Amino acid sequence: MRKAFRGFLSLAVLIGTVGATGASAGAATAAEPAAIRTGTAADNGTGTDIKDRILAIPGMSLIEEKPYAGYRYFVLNYTQPIDHRNPSKGTFQQRITLLHKDTSRPTVFYTGGYNVSTNPGRSEPTRIVDGNQVSLEYRFFTPSRPAPADWSKLDIWQAASDQHRVFTALKAIYTKNWLATGGSKGGMTATYFERFYPKDMDGVVAYVAPNDVVNKEDSAYDRFFENVGTKECRDRLNGVQREALVRRDPLEKKYREYAAANGYTFDTTGSLDKAYEAVVMDYVWAYWQYSLLSDCDTIPADAASATDQEIWDSIDAISGFSAYTDQGLERYTPYYYQAGTQLGSPDIKQPWLGNLSRYGYQPPRNYVPRSIPMKFQPSVMRDVDTWVKNHADRMLYVYGENDPWGAERFRPGARSHDSYVMTVPGGNHGANVAGLAADDNAKATAAILRWAGVAPAAVQDDPAKAKPLAKFDTRLDRQDVRNERQLRR
């Protein structure tokens, strides 16, 4: 829940609009439909422009259409009930985007778990299957927030029901197979959607999705930090973090000047001191979440001899001193609310800090305005975990070996069918199928193609031949770390 948390946030966006790396590109692009090649209004012989078909859906309205070669790209609003159990309580407008390829292609339902980007982007599964992509903004992230906001209606079932209604509305147009995907909180979101509406999707690809089953038991994270990377790298990181607390007075003076210069305030956390320590406490986590072992040379080797500016610069580059200001927290209030009511949040010991910490790992409650009531529901994640172990069919989980969030992960059990958990060697919170070892890469790609109903005959005969059906596009498939650097999720 903090900058590292915000990373978790991560990635959501990181993996979702994140595409595969160029190295994994190479398969021929599927033939474009005539409607796209010629620019005519007809869509696959219906005689009706695809935009008109979409806008004919009750509750669907157009914000804008943006051009992109080979696609139609729409930014839309969709009218949703505030409470799916009681639609009479009112509605709100939920923002979605649609990257239209062809109604004869499969469709990928991407959920980042946060705001949705309004620029064209393609998730890795979308490129693999050469399909359409529907992307959904998570409820209560502005502007997709009811007014007034009844925060009790922000929970994983309500959000899954948002997805179910969008899917049901668009399935009449996009009739081929659908896959759900997302990274970090988006991977969790895709999992919850499958748990509550298991008949909607034909498969799920969840990237770096944490699974905090018992919120008060976080020893898995402590074990992770005892062994990740190398001792030399761990010692460098621990040293800088410790020095930042040893030098609290001079560095907080710098922080106070930094806040004044930028107009930052600290009403939500309660004090500059709490915000400062929250940033510092995130440092080691945030490094492993977004950096690689090879980046350790950028960390001061002898923290005790480093200048105040060098310590400040390293903490700011990795954790970000704006993270726990009121201005940095405001956008992510819905995330912290969910972390403190249902999702859970990690609490790690960091013994190398001794008694230097005044507040420990602060809970999500500290990052949500006190005017919003919160109460944790311990049974929610246990329910999801039990469901995944017993009923997860056609689900793929991808994790990074050196990503802290993978310390507590989803694990489909013996009763699950055609489901997989794979790990990218040396990978961080940006882990994806393209980064898997060759055998796993081929197996995962073949499964995605199979679930989407577009596996070529050669792949059906030999999964080792599986490759993405669409060529890599440097704009559509870029890694988007817009929000990730701010939140540990």
Image (cartoon, rainbow, N blue to C red):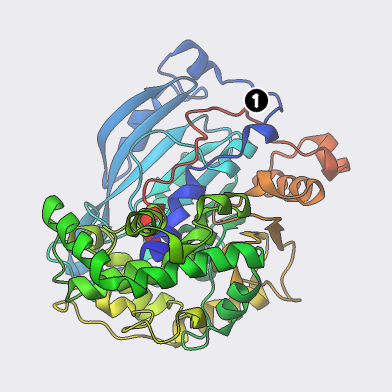
Q: Can the viewer see residue 74?
A: yes
Query: What residue is rendered at 35% in x and 85% in y?
Result: 376
In the rendered view, tell whether residue 343 sits above or below residue 417.
below
* Residue at 30% over, 86% down: 375
Quick one: SS at disc 1? loop
Quarter of the rendering containing residue 62: top left
Image point (69%, 38%), residue name = 454
Say left or right for 425 vs 113.
right
Q: Residue furthest top?
A: 38
Rendering coords of residue 329 (x, y %):
25, 63
* Quadrant of image for the N terminus: bottom left
Q: Quadrant location of the C terminus?
A: bottom left
Q: Which residue is mark 1?
A: 30
Residue 83, position as x, y percentages in the image = 27, 69
Q: Seen in the image, is 427 located left or right of residue 473?
A: right
* Picture coordinates of residue 334, whole percent (x, y): 28, 66
Q: Residues within 10 Å of mark 1 (few under 14, many from 20)?
A: few
Q: Nearer the viewer, residue 4 or 283?
A: 283
**Left or right, 51 with reference to 230:** left
Q: Is residue 111 above or below residue 406?
A: above
Q: Residue furthest front?
A: 305
Q: Is residue 158 visible?
A: no
Observer-nearest of 248 and 259: 248
Q: Which residue in the rendered view is the most extreme toward the right?
A: 461
Question: Residue 265's x, y, as percent?
Answer: 13, 63
Foreground of the two, 44 or 233 = 233
Q: Nearer the viewer, residue 177 or 255?
A: 255
Q: Amino acid at mark 1?
A: Ala
